[in-house]
Amino acid sequence: MSCPKTKLISAYLDKEMGLREKTAFETHVQGCTKCSYRLEEARSLKAAFAKTESHPAPYGFATRVMARTAALEKRKLPWFVPLFIRFAETAALIIVIFVGIIAGKVMTNGSATEQTNIASSLSLDLFAATPPGSLGGAYIAVTEAGNEK
Ligand SMILES: [Zn+2]
């Protein structure tokens, strides 16, 4: 179980608390083993970071970073481009739907010769119950001959 007041430790160490809040936290830490342990842990961590060597940034570093950031901001697309892309997607979808509807009408309402051409081009005669010359056709012929007797 952790104490909910452990969240206040970093604010306490960074001196971001008011006087009343600070004294309330200090009296809580005296009675709470979790908070006192976490506070000592955070203090030693902060001390370890304070001992580390700091390196100054190279000359003009901040200026270069800000210039790059400004260049990236310029590269952003204008506000209407996403809208245009959505419009193009919607238009393409509508075109595809209409082409499908028109193609369906051409296939179903076309003249009889067109229908037979389509049927022959799709080889729908293969889906007959027994295609001529097939093993199934021979079997049915034999069984029907047997039933006729
Ligand atoms: Zn506590």
Image (cartoon, rainbow, N blue to C red):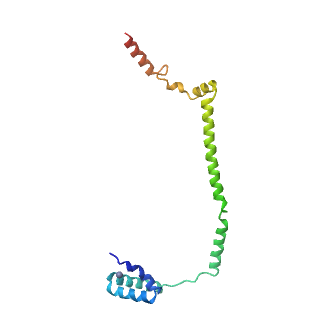
Q: Residue at x 45, y 83 (%)?
A: 11
Where residue 81 sits, quadrant-wise, is bottom right
For residue 46, above or below residue 131? below
For residue 98, above or below residue 134? below
Q: What quarter of the picture does the C terminus occupy?
A: top left
**Pick the front one: 18 or 59:** 18
Q: Residue furthest front?
A: 20
Horizontal side, residue 8 vs residue 88: left or right: left
Instruction: Give the x, y percent position of residue 115.
Output: 60, 26
Q: Residue at x 66, y 72 (%)?
A: 70
**Pick the front one: 65 or 110:** 110
Instruction: Give the x, y percent position of residue 40.
Output: 38, 85
Q: Residue at x 61, y 33 (%)?
A: 105
Where residue 99 sits, quadrant-wise, is top right
Q: What quarter of the picture does the N terminus occupy?
A: bottom left
Instruction: Give the x, y percent position of residue 90.
Output: 62, 50
Quarter of the render that holds ligand 1: bottom left
**Pick the front one: 146 or 91:** 91
Where residue 10 sits, quadrant-wise, is bottom left
Tell me how many marks there are. Answer: 0
Q: Residue furthest top?
A: 149
